[in-house]
Image (cartoon, grey):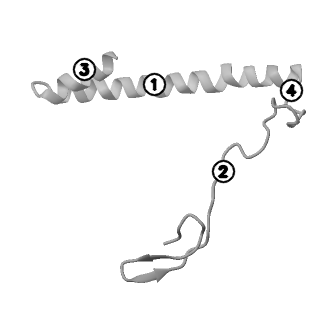
Amino acid sequence: MPDESGGEQEHGGGNVTAPHVQLRLNSGPGPLAPGGDQDFASTPAEKKAAADTIETELQPNTQKASDHADEATTSAGNGFGGWETAAGLKTVAET
C-alpha cells in the first residue's frame, strides 16, 4: 500500500506497489478570485435561456418526480397498515 510519500508500505507480510494518486480540490483560482478566469459572466440572452430552461423543464419535471414519490410513499404506507413501517412512512411523508 502506498504511504503518504507515494512509496511502498509493507502490508500483510509483503510489499505492494501502487502509483501515487493525489486529488486536490480548489487547486486553482476560481472565476471570482483575483487572477481567476475573467470570462465568468453570462450575457442577458444566456441568463434568459437558463431561466427559461428552469421554468419550462427543470421545475415541472422535478415537480412530477416529487408527486410520483409522494404517491408511492402514500401507497406503501397504506400497504403496511398496522405495522410500524406504516407509521415511519407517514412520518417521512409529513416532513
- Contact? badges 2 and 1 (CB < 8 Å): no
Q: Quadrant of residue 70?
A: top left
Pointer 1 residue = 66
Q: Nearer the viewer, mark 1 or mark 3?
A: 3
Residue 28, compared with residue 59, is above or below; it is below
Amino acid type of disc 1?
A: Ser
Q: Measure the alpha-carbon separation of dots 2 and 4.
A: 26 Å
Task: Name which of mark 1 and mark 3 comes first in the sequence.
Answer: 1
Task: Name which of mark 1 and mark 4 comes first in the sequence.
Answer: 4
Task: Name which of mark 3 and mark 2 comes first in the sequence.
Answer: 2
64, 9: nearer the viewer: 9
Q: Measure the alpha-carbon separation of dots 1 and 4.
A: 32 Å
- Contact? badges 1 and 3 (CB < 8 Å): no
Pointer 3 residue = 90
Q: Measure the alpha-carbon separation of dots 3 and 4.
A: 45 Å
Task: Name which of mark 3 and mark 4 comes first in the sequence.
Answer: 4
Picture residue at 51% right of the left edge, 22% below the top: 63
The location of residue 79, given as percent across then percent down, is 18, 29
Report the side of 51 relative to 57 (left or right).
right
Amino acid type of disc 3?
A: Lys
* Label 3 residue SS: helix
Report the side of 28 relative to 71 (left or right).
right
Task: Name which of mark 2 and mark 4 comes first in the sequence.
Answer: 2
Please tell me the numbered disc located at residue 41: 4
The location of residue 44, given as percent across then percent down, is 87, 19
